[in-house]
Image: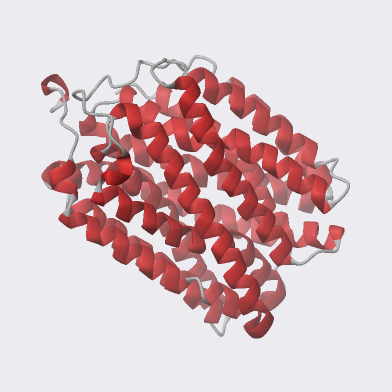
Amino acid sequence: MRLYPVFAVGMLAITDAFVNQALSVLAPDITSSFGVSTGTLTSLLAIQLLAVGVAPFLMSAVVRGRPIRALVSIVTGLVWSGSTFAISFAGDIWTLGALLLVSGLANGSQIALHSPLLADVYPPAVRGRVLALYGAAMPAGAILSPLTVSALSGWFGLDWRAVYAVLGVLSMLGCLSALRLRDPGIGRREEVTPDGSPLRSPTLRRVFAAFVAYGMLLVPAATFLSVHLKERWGMETDVRGLFTAISSAGAVVALVSFGRRLDAIFQADPGRVPVVAARIVACSALAFAAGAAAPVLPLTLLAFFTGLVLTPMIVPMVTLIMIAVTGPARRSYMASLFGVGLAIGGLAGAALLNTVEKTYGTAGAVASIALPGLLAGVLIASTARTIRAELVPVREENVNV
């Protein structure tokens, strides 16, 4: 199995993680600098995610039927790297929001193009491990970014603006490593299927609803976890960054180890994948809630560590479900719909947490995300009854590759 394509696409994902992970670690410093609440910053992140979900529809229309997904992915990677660098010069919260919006529009290529591109590069028999390896790129970025933030802010004493300038340069260099990535063509592995609306599929409708609920867990947790560690336990930026990096290292190990197992599960019975995914979603939601309510720091860190390790494992499994029941020509559009669902959930989660925080504080706000997380698990599990009947037929030469 050639590793360069997944490495190149993964490197683009790592550079994307630079801005998002840094924002998570530096959230208290940024809100203090601009004199705004954590809820305001969370709302900006949710709006950015909405842009991530909307932009891919335009990108999907541009690349439809043409093998240019690799080129578009590289160009947009350079755009979000430039936005990362420009954040260091933001003079107010609205300028920061505008740059996050530009970055979000560019990030749309990651959701719309990366997974469909990998699905055409690699045969179905190895897609589980490929998606797991690609999924490991995000926590890998979550290792590199916080460690870089910790080193720059803790060891070199740089403020958050200087940190963003350095991250922008590193992100640009990472994107340049993907210049040899090529698009093999759309629909290389599967039989031709009708181009009907993807949301006619019961499986995809339920997974879309699950992504809305999952967004209510994912988006607020990224910001409020860091704020909780500072406000409740007095952990400074460098220590929070180190904890995030350790948690992400655990996620990378879990994903790399799980890839072959995911292929084996899918090949034996595709209906088992949603059940496993649902269990992981539920456990991650409960872990975040337990971390927020824990009375001592060791239990807090253990619970948050568990949640941060489990969360990155969800997307590869849900993506595998989506690819398995969606025709190649429609995968970019379906991935875009999933991005919108995630963004809608993020906005709803931000609104929920802002309301809960006023009454119960940050700990209560983080704990409240357990409910939509559990709902997401139930919705994903329900697709076990429909996925087998909706599988896209694979060309015979690719069945056992």
Q: Classify residue 64 by image quadrant.
A: top left
Instruction: Look at the picture and state if 323 lies above or below 235.
Output: above
Instruction: Look at the picture and state if 119 lies above or below 316.
Output: above
User: In the depicted view, which residue is nearer to us: 380 or 84?
Assistant: 380
User: In the depicted view, which residue is nearer to us: 52 or 170?
Assistant: 52
Q: Quadrant of the C terminus?
A: top left
Query: Does residue 82 appear in the picture of this structure?
Result: yes
With 153 as the anchor, is 280 left or right in this view?
A: left
Q: Residue at x 49, y 75 (%)?
A: 289
Q: Residue at x 56, y 36 (%)?
A: 55
Q: Quadrant of the N terminus?
A: top left
Q: Where does the image place residue 184, in percent across and percent down from the top left? A: 36, 15
Q: How is the image coloured?
A: secondary structure
Q: Residue at x 27, y 19 (%)?
A: 188
Q: Residue furthest right?
A: 91
Q: Where does the image place residue 21, in percent across and percent down from the top left? A: 62, 49
User: In the depicted view, which residue is nearer to us: 47 or 254?
Assistant: 47
